[in-house]
Amino acid sequence: MKKIEQYFESFLWSSRLSVMAAVIASLVSSLAMFYLITIDTISMISHILHYASLDQTDRLIMRSETITHVVELIDGYLLATVLLIFSFGLYELFISKIDAAESCDNSSKVLFISSLDDLKARLAKVVLMILIVKFFEHALTMSFTTPLDLLAFAGGIALIGLALYLSHAAETRH
């Protein structure tokens, strides 16, 4: 009976390696997002090179479109970062510590994950930033036709401030 228990526990422990599928998929998705957003950035820059030659009306339109596009780019880079942090976190929690990161002087403490709660907290911060960027993106195209619209917008800003305050307060308590 002891032998069966040892085999089962060995199999159970080895099954953690199945998480490698999620680690690899998340890492590849992150790299793909970085690639896509970088190509979009280069494309945006190439389009705004002729900005100075536009008349005033076209400049206003291009400025508005460019600001919206920059916000989308930030959103894309944040999503790629979430996937990267998720990949590192799963690897460190289930497979092994990343020795290269621990021995590197300039490695970021963001990438060191010690528990599932730690991973969730780090991901939550980045997701919160994505939501803030999305809110800003929608705010650029909002039209305020009634005072209630403006009040709802102000309430959204207040809730964002509260979310940032609470996430910072939770971080400083730990």
Image (cartoon, helix red, strand yellow):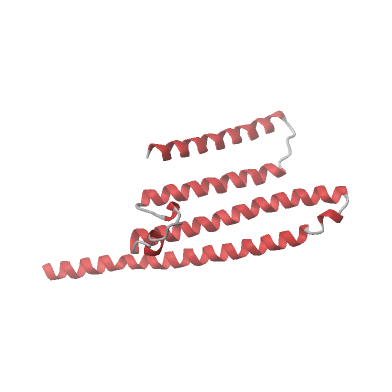
Q: Quadrant of the C terminus?
A: top left
Residue at figure coordinates x 48%, y 59% from the top left: 84
Marks counted in the figure total 0
Residue at 45 percent of width and 54 percent of height = 108
The image quadrant that residue 93 belongs to is: bottom left
Q: Quadrant of residue 172?
A: top left
* Residue nearer the viewer, 41 or 5: 41
The location of residue 18, given as percent across then percent down, is: 36, 67
Q: On screen, 173 above or below 13?
A: above
Q: Is residue 74 above or below residue 171?
A: below
The front one of 64 and 105 is 105
Point 68% across, 32% down: residue: 150
- Residue lying at the far left of the rendered structure: 1
Point out residue 63 in the picture as x, y percentages from the top left corner.
77, 49
Question: Dividing the image into 4 quarters, which one contains the N terminus?
Answer: bottom left
Most extreme residue toward the front is: 105
Whether 56 is drawn above or below 173: the answer is below
Residue 168: percent from the left, percent from the top? 47, 38
Q: Position of residue 2 (x, y in %)?
A: 11, 67
Residue at x-position 39% and y-position 67%: 20
Query: Left of 160 or right of it: where is 141?
Result: right
